[in-house]
Image: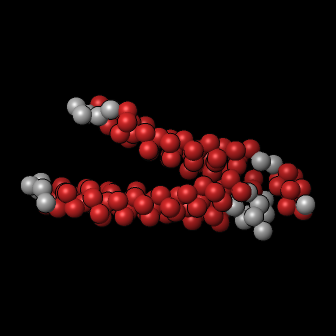
Amino acid sequence: MIKNHYYLIVGVLCVLFAVTHTLNGISTNLQILGGSAIEHSAKTAFTYVWHIIGIENLVFGTALLLMAFQKKPSRVKFVAWLIIMILALRWIVIAAFTLSSQTGHVMQILPDTIAILASITLLILGTKRKDTICNHLTQQ
């Protein structure tokens, strides 16, 4: 039985983000990179860094899906806060490097900003739930 719907929603979103990030990389960004004159080692580094983010999203999603079914949500609250911190720092890195580049502007970070802020907001709401509230709601 689902004990924390917020974790469930963010878990599903993270799995979807993992799939779309990976497919987007394969169909667009990594293909452009393949045809460029950049050194092979730089292409390799960019490719694995791209896939690390996809795998990270998949791990977050899997963890959150498992956390959604925990009987005592307070036991997994630390993991939720850790994921919140990683997502916040990821957004800071994305925003800083994008906006400091010569061609960077706010519209480039809008999709990432929306996805990350929505995930963080739902996770914070999930951490605010009390075990007694969760138990009361699931018994109804």
Q: Is residue 12 left or right of residue 42?
A: right
The reply to whether residue 138 is in sight is yes
- The quarter of the displayed image where residue 118 is located: top right
Classify residue 35 as left or right of residue 60.
left
Going 37% across and 36% down the picture, which residue do you hit? 107
Q: Is residue 110 above or below residue 58?
A: above
Along the line of sight, which residue is nearer the eye, 35 or 38? Answer: 35
Residue, x 29% and y 34% (percent of image)?
A: 104
User: What percent of the width, then of the height, locates residue 84?
Assistant: 57, 46
Q: Is residue 60 visible?
A: no
The answer to whether residue 127 is left or right of residue 27 is right
| Callout count | 0
- Say which quadrant the N terminus sits in: bottom right
- Kindly give the residue lying farthest to the bottom in the view shown: 1
User: Picture coordinates of residue 79 (x, y %)?
Assistant: 62, 53
Q: Position of residue 16 (x, y in %)?
A: 50, 61
Using the image, determine if residue 85 lies above or below residue 35.
above
Q: How is the image coloured?
A: secondary structure
> Which residue occupies 89% across, 56% down?
136
Placement of the C terminus among the 4 image quadrants: bottom right
Q: Residue at x 37, y 63 (%)?
A: 22
Say which quarter of the image contains residue 51.
bottom left
Give the x, y percent position of residue 60: 54, 59
